[in-house]
Image (cartoon, rainbow, N blue to C red):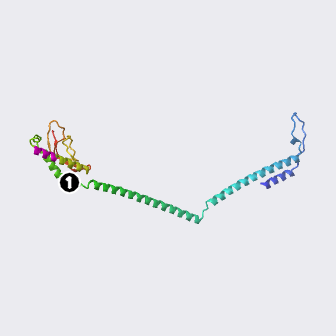
Amino acid sequence: MIQRTLLRSLQAATRQPQPLRLTRATHSTPLSASAFRSPSQQLASRRHYAQEAEVKKEETLADQADAQGQGDKSTATSTPHTPATDAVQKELDAKKKEVLELTDRVKRSVADYRNLQEQTKREIQASRDFALQRFAKDLLDSVDNLDRALINVPAENLVAENKDLLQLHAGLKMTEEILMTTLKKHGLERFDPAEAGHRFDPNKMEATFQAPQEGKEEGSVFYTQAKGFLLNGRVLRAAKVGVVKNS
């Protein structure tokens, strides 16, 4: 660009200057100092301004080229692509993947161990709750016989004249209460569906017969043949009952 500028300046210098023509001023506006310069002075001034513009333009382009070169150099320096760095990056990715897999295995192992702990606790609690199940079943016949003995004594016979019978009945009643209180402490409870007029529940009751009963709701229990027992909320023995059927 500088060579072109110099060449143009030389060509302009070699041209013949035009003769200066003097014209009569048609208005009274004052002329500037540049109007009285000679052609050679004007040409030199123009060359000077043109050279300054070209120099500024060349400096601007050089600065931009240097800035771009420094950016490319910094980028190339920060992220070099070599076989060694690629191998290191692959190894680092493989190690990260291995760490993730091992972490997942450890978490799964911890979860399985906690589930096993909870299951073991539930099994131990179930064993404690129903440890007396077999022993309680063996006691049911004795409890039933004791209950039958108390029921079969007529209330009109329990008078002061029958002192022995009265005392025997009171002793049996007390024994039954103490026995049922002790069994209840260990989770064994007795229930009689006919006392409250419950509806027939196949989960807790066994219908031995059906019969019509006036004034009672269809499907309700009106007679208990054998009372039922629950062990910690689970049916140990279903109650044998009579169910109302009016239809």
Image quadrant of residue 222? Answer: top left
- Indicate whether 90 appears above or below 64: below
Q: Which residue is mark 1?
A: 137
Compare residues 10 and 164 and report the one nearer the observer. Answer: 164
Q: Is residue 206 visible?
A: no
**Main SS class of the magenta portion in the image:** helix
Q: Residue furthest left?
A: 161
Q: Residues within 10 Å of mark 1 (few under 14, many from 20)?
A: some
Q: Position of residue 157 (x, y in %)?
A: 10, 41
Image quadrant of residue 108? Answer: bottom left
Residue located at (36% from left, 57% from top): 117
- The range drawn in magenta is 163-172
- Tell me which amino acid carries mark 1: Lys
Q: Position of residue 79 (x, y in %)?
A: 61, 60
Q: Position of residue 22 (x, y in %)?
A: 90, 40
Side of 97 where 146 appears, left or right: left
Q: Position of residue 233 (x, y in %)?
A: 26, 49
Side of 128 where 50 appears, left or right: right
Side of 243 where 186 appears, left or right: right
Residue located at (75% from left, 51% from top): 57
Residue located at (31% from left, 56% from top): 124
